[in-house]
Amino acid sequence: MSDIAILGAGAFGTALAIALSHHGNRVTLWARDPEAVRIMNAERCNARRLPGAAFPANLVVTADLPAALASARTVLLTVPMQSLAGLLAQAHPAEGSALVACCKGVDLASGLGPTGVIAAACPGAIPAVLTGPSFASDIGHLLPTALTLACADAEAGPALQHQLSTPVLRLYLSRDMAGAELGGALKNVVALAAGITMGAGFGESARAAIITRGFAEMLRFAETTAADPDTLRGLSGLGDLTLTATSEKSRNYRAGLALGRGEPLPEGMTIEGVATAQAVERLAAKRNVPMPLTAMVAAVTRGEVSVPEAAAALLARPLKAE
């Protein structure tokens, strides 16, 4: 039995807390809002974020950040990407703790991925990233799920793999943290584009083309980084893209549907692909990497072009070999 802290009580953090405590771990789930914590402890579930998924007895929920970190040497970070740096500025995990990023995206302020933010804020920690095709409702209701756990530390990685795996949560280990987190970030941009395509009524054939060409952009961008493009062909890239760009359970896909229909983005929903599109557009321009789909998603979400104008611009691009 091991002590695990999960910082962030959204749907995904709650789901992981349930799955890992169900497997016998002592899990502490931290939430910012004391009133939300009081309700979760009283009801023994997170009815607002993950209805129908009961808390095991060995799952503790608290709003006390130092208490959550007191005995845990494995810490899962399940806050949104743009909140990660702020959280790590408040948290003081023990030296040598494994900090596992479960958020997907690129930090707008620094241009770093989640493990880069961890390394900058907590240089004594062991950074890792948990990513791949998964919906919180599936994990929280103990349905079979396979994810990628990326950790560059040759000793800590296998230990984390065994600690965080359960009979229904299967983790595949990778040393390529850059590739794993890049796949998780970029697929959200493509999912937005896929949703926009369907929301605008362009059809499933167009969506298939968007997903395929979007994946080509993901690989092209990966080649300019320390990432191994082959990593993006696995669960953390292609697998996550397949799920996120085709299902209305995906927040980014639903946001794209709204944009395609001419509706505003849903309020109060974390849509990582919006910020990621802006950050990656800047990085791609600096590196001279052609990413027309990402640029159009960034322009549409900024309100600079309409969906019909974006579609016309993409269709008017010069013909070329695949």
Image (cartoon, rainbow, N blue to C red):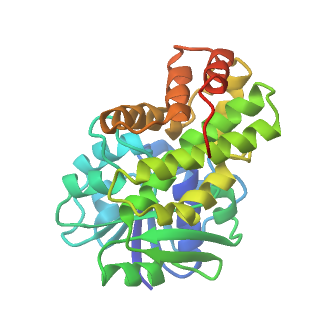
Location of the N terminus (image quadrant): bottom left
Q: Residue 160 at x, y = what percent?
A: 40, 78
Residue 24's x, y, as percent? 53, 82
95 shown above or below 259: below
Q: Nearer the viewer, residue 206 or 268?
A: 206
Write the residue at 48% across / 79% down.
Answer: 25
* Left or right: 304 as drawn, with respect to 67: right
Q: Quadrant of residue 119?
A: bottom left
Give the x, y percent position of residue 306.
62, 14
Residue found at x 61% / y 65% = 55
Q: Residue at x 35, y 52 (%)?
A: 114
Residue 47 visible somewhere in the drawing: no
Q: Quadrant of residue 192?
A: top right
Q: Residue at x 48, y 65 (%)?
A: 231
Seen in the image, is 82 located left or right of residue 104? left
Q: Is residue 200 left or right of residue 300?
A: right
Q: Position of residue 14 (x, y in %)?
A: 55, 58
Relative placement, left or right, of 191 versus 229 is right
Q: Nearer the viewer, residue 202 or 279?
A: 202
Number of marks in the rendered image: 0
The relative height of residue 42 versus residue 139 in the rendered view (above or below) is: above
Q: Height in image: 96 above or below 186?
A: below
Q: Is residue 193 visible?
A: yes
When asked about the image quadrant of residue 163, the answer is: bottom left
